Amino acid sequence: MFVLGLTGSIGMGKSTTAEMFRAAGIAVHDSDATVHELYRGTAAALVEAAFPGTVREGRVDRAVLAAQVLNDSDAMKRLETIVHPLVRASRQDFVAAARARGDKLVVVDIPLLFETGAEVEVDAVVLVTAPETVQKQRLAARPGMTAARLAAIMNKQMPDHEKRRRADFVIDTGGTHAETERQVQELLRRLLGEAASVPAGDKG
């Protein structure tokens, strides 16, 4: 089975691209969605213990938590030591289940793939990117996106040019939806032809 890591900086179109893989029948593990689930379950008590007052009615209040950690690197590191291992475990369970089903290819959507060293878990990395002007337009249209919040997020992310250098494949979402979809389909044709040659148990 081939494990494809999907990543991209904020505003680059990663979520849209992930949906294109799903529409093509490929199972996708979504790290962001997993965090949302953890904040309603397993992680809630752990986060509350580390950041008192951040859990309301049994779930993490993301706005309250963000106010405590976004501009505090030590606090962010404490949060990451709680959340990242839980997300990684969820991802590993997902890959194991897909392997047991006999899937030829799965996608794991990891926003901070290079930043967290997660490339060792996958067989190849596809980077979703777009011109900076397009990225800024998308971010400006997001509700609740402030300059301070954006700066905090960008400070955690590797520059796009470095991600381009390290990625195995690049999908440019700066054009039309159809153009992005064509790139996804082309990549799938290539990978599904190669998936059978990946030894069982290799990475992931």
Image (cartoon, grey):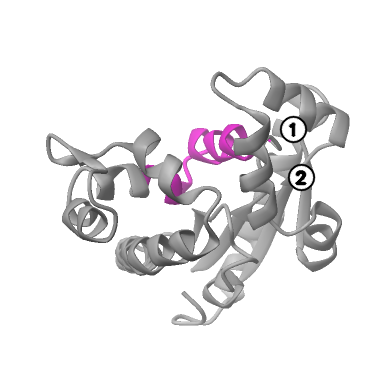
- The segment highlighted magenta reads 13-33
Percent of width and height locating residue 124: 65, 67
Q: Residue at x 74, y 32 (%)?
A: 180
Secondary structure found at label 2? strand
Secondary structure found at label 1? helix
Q: Is residue 29 visible?
A: no
How would you classify the magenta stretch by its main secondary structure? helix
User: Height in image: 92 above or below 203?
Assistant: above
Q: Would you call the spot at circle 2 few (<14 residues within 10 Å), some (14-19), or many (20 or more)? A: many
Q: Would you call the spot at circle 1 few (<14 residues within 10 Å), some (14-19), or many (20 or more)? A: many
Left/right placement of residue 159 relative to residue 30 reads: right
Q: Residue at x 82, y 27 (%)?
A: 134
Q: Are marks 1 and 2 in contact (CB under 8 Å)?
A: yes
Q: Nearer the viewer, residue 17 or 58?
A: 58
Percent of width and height locating residue 41: 17, 48
Which mark, by number, is residue 180? 1
- Amino acid type of the residue tagged 2 in the rendering: Ile
User: Height in image: 71 above or below 145?
Assistant: below
Left/right placement of residue 133 relative to residue 84 reads: right
Left/right placement of residue 45 relative to residue 147 reads: left
Q: Residue at x 55, y 40 (%)?
A: 18
Residue at numbered disc 2: 171
User: Height in image: 102 above or below 199?
Assistant: above
Percent of width and height locating residue 66: 44, 42
